[in-house]
Structures are given as C-alpha cells and as structure tokens.
Image (spheres, rainbow, N blue to C red):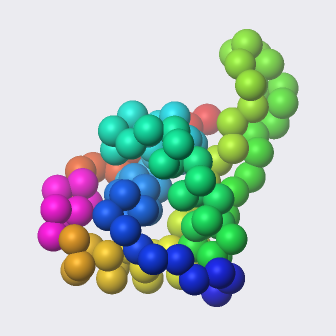
Amino acid sequence: MGERISLTYPTALILQALANGYRYGFDVMDVTGLPSGTVYPALRRLERAGMVASTWEALDAARAELRPARRYYELTADGFESLAAATKRFQHLARLAAAPPRPAEG
C-alpha cells in the first residue's frame, strides 16, 4: 500500500460508488452528492494509497462524443479491503452497498 489515508465518510462513499460501478469523477459526484473539490482530491489520494487504479479512455471515444477524455477508476484489492472495513465503521454505507451495480460502459 502507498500513502496512508484516513477513511472518512466521504472517502468511504467514493469507494462504495466505485465498487457499484460508477467509474469516473462526474458519475461519482452524481451518485454521492459530493462536490468536485472533495471527489477529485480524494480519488488522487486513494490512487496514491494503492486503493484505486485509473486509466484514461481512448481519445477517439471521447472525441466521438465531443467531450474531454474521461479518467476511469476502479478499486484494487486494497480498496475492497478498505471498503469492507469502512462498511463496518459507517453503517449508512449499507444503503449504497445494497444498490445494484451499474452496468459497464462500452
């Protein structure tokens, strides 16, 4: 694992959103209700800590939809482990955890 981060409730929400199939920042913001100033720095910290991995989508795919390329995030094994611990710590995460996973895009 990389840098140690404290698992706050917003960070746990982000992990849960990723586990549910929300893969890029705007999607995570929509499902959690968290602002970009919380989501994007948390995603960077989670990646540095080894809980999240990211990849950029192909530029052709983004251009075809006339938008910037998206950075897609997914949980690593450490991320799933941290999410399990967070779910025990933050009881309200169970509601989001019970939501059906989002179907994979393209």
Looking at the image, residue 60 lies above or below residue 19: above
- The spot of residue 29 in percent (x, y) is 44, 39
- The spot of residue 80 in percent (x, y) is 45, 75
Q: Residue at x 37, y 68 (%)?
A: 8
Residue lying farthest to the front in this orientation? 37
Looking at the image, residue 42 lies above or below residue 83: above
Q: In which quarter of the image is residue 24?
A: top right
Q: Residue at x 50, y 48 (%)?
A: 39
Within the magenta stretch, is there residue 57? no
Give 11 or 103, whichever is nearer the viewer.
11
The majority secondary structure of the magenta stretch comes to helix
Looking at the image, residue 42 lies above or below residue 30: below
Quarter of the image for the N terminus: give it.
bottom right
Chain part drawn in magenta: 91-97
- The spot of residue 5 in percent (x, y) is 53, 77
Q: In which quarter of the image is residue 7?
A: bottom left
Give 75 or 26, whichever is nearer the viewer.
26
Q: In this view, does 82 lie to the left or right of 37?
A: left
Q: Which residue is drawn at 15% across and 70% down?
A: 91
From this viewpoint, is residue 103 visible? no
Q: Residue at x 61, y 35 (%)?
A: 106
Number of marks: 0
